[in-house]
Amino acid sequence: MGVDPGLAAAGWGIVEVLGSRLTYLAHGCIKTAAGIPRSERLLAIYLAFNEVLDLYLPGEAGMETLYFAKNVTSAMPVAEARGVLCLALAERSIHVGEYTPMAIKQAVVGSGGAGKAEVQELVRLLLGLPVIPKPDHAADALAAAVCRAHDSVDLVRLARGSRVGI
């Protein structure tokens, strides 16, 4: 599973990993309205995310670390939403791999300096989708899922004593 945390929109994406093959299962976005008190928005995210977890039963999750070079004022609400999402995952003992935006781009495209459109197109291609997943938050969550899947495959190779190229 991949998760793109946010208070207004929290994206999620589910992929299945069979060996080194990724298969798309689902994606979506949990949206909350700006006029509602923050505590109610966080509860809505928590409840909706739990429904997703109950439906798909993911074994692992990948989530982007907080990065606020452009909009520092949104850091606290996003951090709170991220906390609610992490809580729901922790309640189910689902391990969360945390990745910088650069690490996710590197895992999906092969370059940490890739643009958003390039990442989304590669997510589409890697998962065999006919169109780029929408909304953007869900596409970002699928990118985090791809990153986690690649990381998990590398961890299994390391555990088996195989050499992993970096």
Image (spheres, grey):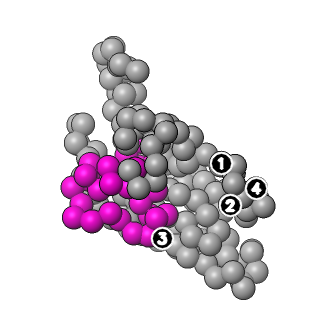
The amino acid type, in three-letter code, at marker 3 is: Cys
Is any part of residue 123 visible from this angle?
Answer: no
Q: Position of residue 123 (x, y in %)?
A: 33, 52
Confirm whether the magenta stretch covers residue 41: no
From the image, tell me which residue sits under label 1. Answer: 67
Q: Position of residue 161 (x, y in %)?
A: 33, 14
The amino acid type, in three-letter code, at marker 4 is: Val
Is any part of residue 10 visible from this angle?
Answer: yes
From the image, tell me which residue sits under label 4. Answer: 72
Residues at marks 4 and 1, CA–CA distance in whole angstroms: 9 Å
Please tell me whether mark 1 or mark 3 is closer to you in this view: 1
First along the sequence among labels 1 and 3 = 3
Residues at marks 2 and 3, CA–CA distance in whole angstroms: 15 Å
- Lateral position of residue 70 relative to residue 110, left or right: right
CB under 8 Å between discs 4 and 1: no
For label 4, the SS is: helix
Image quarter hosting the C terminus: top left
First along the sequence among labels 2 and 4 = 4
For label 2, the SS is: helix
| Res 58 → quadrant | bottom left
Please tell me whether mark 2 or mark 4 is closer to you in this view: 4
Q: Position of residue 31 (x, y in %)?
A: 55, 76
- Lateral position of residue 39 relative to residue 94, left or right: right
Instruction: Give the magenta-colored segment's residue range.
Output: 119-147
- Residue 78 got which mark? 2
For label 1, the SS is: loop
From the image, tell me which residue sits under label 3. Answer: 29
Residues at marks 1 and 2, CA–CA distance in whole angstroms: 10 Å
First along the sequence among labels 4 and 3 = 3
